[in-house]
Amino acid sequence: MPVAASSGLVAGPASLDATGAARRSLSDVHLEVRDLWLQRGSRPVFEGLNCVFPRGQITVVAGASGGGKTTLLRILACLLRPNRGEVWVDGEVELTGLAAAAVREFRGRVGMLFQHGALLDAMTVYDNVALPLREHTRLGEAEIRARVETVFTAVGLEGIEALLPGELSGGMVKRAGLARALIGSPDILFCDEPFSGLDPPTVRRVEAVLADVNRRTGATLVITSHHVASTLRTAQHVVMLIDRGAVSGTPKDLLASQDSRVSGFFREPEVLAAIEAADG
């Protein structure tokens, strides 16, 4: 069933930069998905998915559980290839057809915060964060230490360098994973369910860290989350996965949609309060 679009909202096969009201210049688009198809066994996941991720903004990928949020993130990060379709970076590089060496080069430009942190249990937090620099650069230990200390400060984790991951709280694991994702100064930061399993104060703290990273570095953030209210407090752009496609727009665009499947997703009281708070 086609997804209806309201003013400012883009749905179905029309990509965002091809519509009148929501047209973006090429320089505004960091990542663009074009006519993406993916099937897992007999189950279709995406059928002609189109969406864009604006440069330097925080985009939240929302939608029902099992709707393909993490799958889309894995495709964008070159961890999974679709059956067909294209993913463009800067309008110049098409990711799905890259050779292995080019994929490695692209991954060097991005950071990935995995849902459960993906820290190595036998290594200290410091060594976990320093690992990408030790493996992929020729930096000396003094420069590595300076960079690790900088990202620890950025995510609010001073004084925990010598701890093991098992000694951290859930929120600290998320922030340690974020520090490792930031250590290479990425252009794009992918965050898979960064608020999952956290108590409300910690959710707010992680939200603030992500928003601060975006403001300070200008990186493009792509966040998947089922925690709609918390992500909308920081989202500038939303891609909502629905019916194996997507609708895109600002939180207000989605709330104003004439399609009840879209607007209803955002009409819980907590979500409305989050949108009002963001406007304030």
Image (spheres, rainbow, N blue to C red):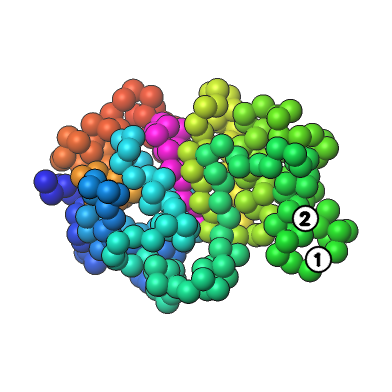
Q: Nearer the viewer, residue 243 or 29?
A: 243
Q: Quadrant of the C terminus?
A: top left
Q: Which residue is mark 1?
A: 139
Disc 1 residue crowd, few under 14, some 14–19, many 20+, Cα 10 Å: few
Q: Is residue 77 above or below residue 232?
A: below
Residue at mark 2: 147
Can you give x and y, in whole percent of width and height, for residue 249 in the image?
31, 50
Q: Left of 2 or right of it: where is 231? A: right
Q: What number is the disc on residue 125?
A: none
In this view, the residue in front, 268 or 194, is 194
Q: How many marks?
A: 2
Are the residues tagged 2 and 1 within 8 Å (C-beta)?
yes
The extreme left residue here reads 1
Residue 165, image quadrant: top right
Q: Residue at x 60, y 60 (%)?
A: 186
Residue 8 located within the stretch drawn in magenta = no
Left or right of residue 145: residue 215: left
Q: Outermost residue toward the front? A: 41
| Picture layout, residue 74 above or below residue 120 | below
Viewer can see residue 61: no
**92 is higher (above) or lower (below) than 240:** below
What residue lies at 54% left-to-right and 54% top-to-bottom? Answer: 189
**Viewer-closest of 243 and 165:** 165
Hey, what amino acid is under mark 1?
Leu
Look at label 2 and name its amino acid.
Answer: Arg
Q: Residue at x 29, y 55 (%)?
A: 38
Magenta highlight range? 219-238
Q: What's the CA distance linking mark 2 and mark 1?
A: 10 Å
The image quarter containing residue 132 is bottom right
Q: Is residue 20 left or right of residue 104?
A: left
Few, some or many C-alpha atoms within 10 Å of disc 2 (few <14, some 14-19, many ≥20)? some
Which residue extends farthest right?
A: 142
